[in-house]
Image (cartoon, rainbow, N blue to C red):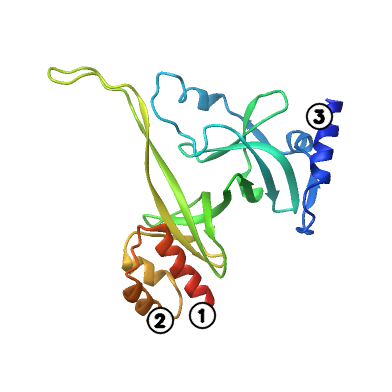
């Protein structure tokens, strides 16, 4: 344990201090002080006989957890369980746990991903959940990955049995204006109505650039255009 603390300290020593608003803490501190929940439930859905994966990244990737009280916990092995909408992490004892108080999370970064826990509206219902940040500003664009769990089916008269499996669906896209709940974008009407102003400029931009609400790059260009106005 002493060696682990020394290693964590050395890793933190080389971390950039550009983000002066966060107090750096080690992975050991994260495990000791942060509220956590056991990940035993997830193992029931990830047995070898289930095809596919519920994870954004199957393997753990070292990253940082930034909290709303301005702590940065560095060098945490992290992965995102899309199906359960949980961020899982591995302890020094190789136990897999899940963050149990996501409302205290400002952002989580690992690999090429930045994830935030944000309020959003889906089918007119208010929810909260993790989303991948695409671009941030007065308007922010998020992608919410979706995984569907298909139960196993038995053999029929003209049908072979099928094993249980996780099916990755297309990402859903959301636009968030400042601190308001993020709104799901399903069509061009949703796209324009999400923004509170500059409607004519946005409509012209959508028409000129043939913006497709299902294309991430197109949505990103529109959001960045809005933020420039």
How far across and how far down the image is residue 217, in percent? Answer: 43, 60
Q: Is residue 85 left or right of residue 110?
A: left
- Give the camera-side residue of 16 and 78: 16
How far across and how far down the image is residue 213, in percent? Answer: 35, 62
The alpha-carbon separation of the residues under discs 1 and 3 comes to 49 Å
**Circles 3 and 2: CB distance less than 8 Å?**
no
What residue lies at 63% left-to-right and 48% top-to-bottom?
A: 108
Q: Is residue 166 left or right of residue 81?
A: left
Mark 2 residue crowding within 10 angstroms, few (<14) / some (14–19) / many (20+): few
Q: Which residue is mark 1?
A: 229
Q: Which residue is mark 3?
A: 4
Res 179 → quadrant: bottom right
How far across and how far down the image is residue 95, in percent? Answer: 65, 24
**Circles 2 and 1: CB distance less than 8 Å?**
yes
* Residue 139 vertical placement versus 114 (above, below): below
Callout 1: SS: loop
**Badge number at residue 201:** 2
Q: Earlier in the sequence, mark 1 or mark 3?
A: 3
Res 158 → quadrant: top left
How far across and how far down the image is residue 193, in percent? Answer: 38, 71
The alpha-carbon separation of the residues under discs 2 and 1 comes to 9 Å
* Residue 67 vertical placement versus 223 (above, below): above
């Amino acid at each position: 344990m002493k060696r682990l603390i020394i290693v964590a300290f050395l890793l933190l020593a080389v971390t950039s201090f550009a983000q002066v608003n966060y107090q750096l803490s080690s992975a050991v501190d994260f495990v000791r002080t942060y509220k956590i929940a056991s990940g035993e439930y997830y193992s029931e859905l990830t047995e070898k006989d289930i095809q596919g994966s519920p994870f954004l990244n199957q393997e753990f990737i070292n990253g940082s957890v930034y909290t709303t009280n301005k702590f940065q916990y560095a060098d945490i092995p992290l992965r995102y369980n899309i199906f359960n909408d949980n961020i899982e992490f591995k302890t020094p004892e190789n136990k897999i746990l899940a963050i149990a108080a996501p409302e205290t999370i400002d952002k989580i970064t690992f690999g090429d991903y930045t994830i935030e826990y944000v309020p959003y509206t889906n089918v007119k219902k208010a929810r909260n959940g993790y989303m991948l940040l695409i671009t941030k500003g007065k308007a922010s664009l998020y992608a919410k990955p979706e995984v569907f769990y298909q139960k196993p089916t038995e053999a029929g008269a003209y049908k072979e049995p099928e094993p249980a499996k996780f099916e990755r669906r297309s990402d859903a896209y959301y636009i968030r204006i400042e601190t308001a709940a993020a709104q799901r974008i399903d069509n061009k009407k949703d796209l324009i109505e999400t923004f509170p102003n500059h409607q004519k400029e946005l409509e012209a931009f959508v028409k000129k650039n043939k913006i497709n609400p299902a294309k991430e790059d197109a949505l990103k260009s529109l959001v960045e255009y809005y933020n420039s106005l």
